[in-house]
Image: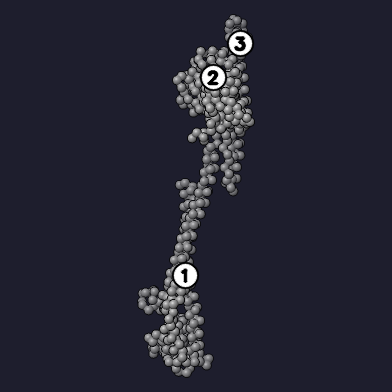
Amino acid sequence: MRLGIRLLFAFFLINGIAAFFVLRVFMAEIKPSVREVMEDMMVDTANILAELASDDLAAGKLADGPFAQHVRRYATRPIDAAIWGFSKQSLDFRVTVTDAAGRVLFDSENRAVGTDHSQWRDVARTLRGEYGARSTREVDGDDTSGVMHVAAPIYVKDSIAGVLTVAKPTRTVQRFIDRAERKVFMGGLLLLALSALVGVAVTLWMVWNVRRLRDYALSVQGPAAAQPPAVPRVPGELGDLARAMDRMRERLAGHDYVEGYVRALTHELKSPVAAIRGAGELLADDLPAADRAGFATQVVQQSERLQRLIDRLLELSKLEQRQHAEGRAPVALRDCAEAAIAQTRARATQRGIALALSGTGASGPWEAELVTLALTNLLDNAIDFSPPGSTVRVELDSTAVAVQDQGPGVPGYALPRLGERFFTTARPGGERSGSGLGLAIVQRVMALHGGRLEVHNTTPGLRVTLNFTPASQTS
């Protein structure tokens, strides 16, 4: 399972469990909380009415006294109140009064006058001097038919002479409960959605930065890379990890750089050193003049080979320490090509190879010395691969220089790897291959200029192009 999916799954699991329990608690507390508030108000109402009814009860005219008249007028009062978006058009309190024996003396709805309520919890507890309240369903099995009853004692000369009960159907506040539950539920869903968005954002941020670190680690190619990848700018501990990875990359790259150089250089030096040693041992003997001249020539050639190897290693080492080219003024590609041809003409003439230049080229913010160095190495490579009597052509375009030889080309598998340090291919006639440093220098020069090296087999020969147009502008 991928990291992003794991993080999202863990976040949604934790968030979902928390939201479920929080919503469950809120939803479960709404109804009892509303009824608690309702009961509190009914306690106040019952006690006020009990005080108002005490005089009529003591006088024995409760059924038709002022208290009864006022309560009946209350029940018929017109009302149209807007309460937080709900319209209230009826008065819902039912008022009953019992004597000290629990018999009903007054009922605002005239339904229970004369009945015995002494066994009802609200009346019985109040007559004992306790707090009396109850909730009773008018229809069995119907939760919406519940009625809350709150009683208060009626005192006459400091003794309980009766009980006043205020009753109110719970359905009158059910719409407030339903609305509160809907609001809590919708708010919970909104909170859950926002939390999910935050979780997705945090997960994407985390996964994106982790993938940047992963891509950075995978993109590290050692000292042979044209340009070391930039360290990802990541905040917090991930940033510390990125910098630690960069320091590790530098240490590993430096170790691999030295190890690879030593191994490859040792391999490259073995052959010319062995050839010089063998020729020197033979020259110590008495040899015919022709043989002596041949071995002396071999010593000179192998010495030149060693010198070119050392010079190219030094050049490549200096180039790999640089981060960019230092173009100060516009440089003409033709001037660089002419300078490179001048430097290699003597060697080409010695091998019987002609050099031809065509095109005008353009000028650009390039470093002339590096461009000339790259072209010189390309010409040396083309001269090594070209048969005697052939022509090496240098063709200039607006922002590109192509070097075309008439040699046998290179195997197809080798084309993508040309430009790697110490990667070599066989020369014509079965001669030993070169060090590969020449094209490595060319590759590094193009990387410093933001260009690219393009190699293609043609008929006949190999065509190597230095394209100074950045790849981003040609895609």
Residue visible at 46% across and 22% down in the picture: 458
Can you tell which mark lies on residue 348?
A: none
SS for callout 3: helix
Residue 398 visible within the image: yes
Residue visible at 60% across and 33% down in the picture: 324
SS for callout 1: helix
Can you tell which mark lies on residue 296?
A: 3
Q: Nearer the viewer, mark 2 or mark 1?
A: 2
Mark 2 crowd level (few <14, some 14–19, many ≥20, 10 Å Cα)? some
Work out whether 74 lies above or below 242.
below
Mark 1 crowd level (few <14, some 14–19, many ≥20, 10 Å Cα)? some
Q: How is the image coloured?
A: one colour
Work out whether 372 lies above or below 292.
below
The percent position of residue 60, horizontal first and vertical second, equals 45, 94
Q: At label 1, which amino acid type do we have?
A: Ile
The quarter holding residue 175 reads: bottom left
Task: State which tag comes first along the sequence, 1 or 3.
Answer: 1
Mark 3 crowd level (few <14, some 14–19, many ≥20, 10 Å Cα)? some
Separation of residues labelled 1 and 3 (CA atoms)? 107 Å
Judging by the rendered image, the residue that carries numbered circle 1 is 30
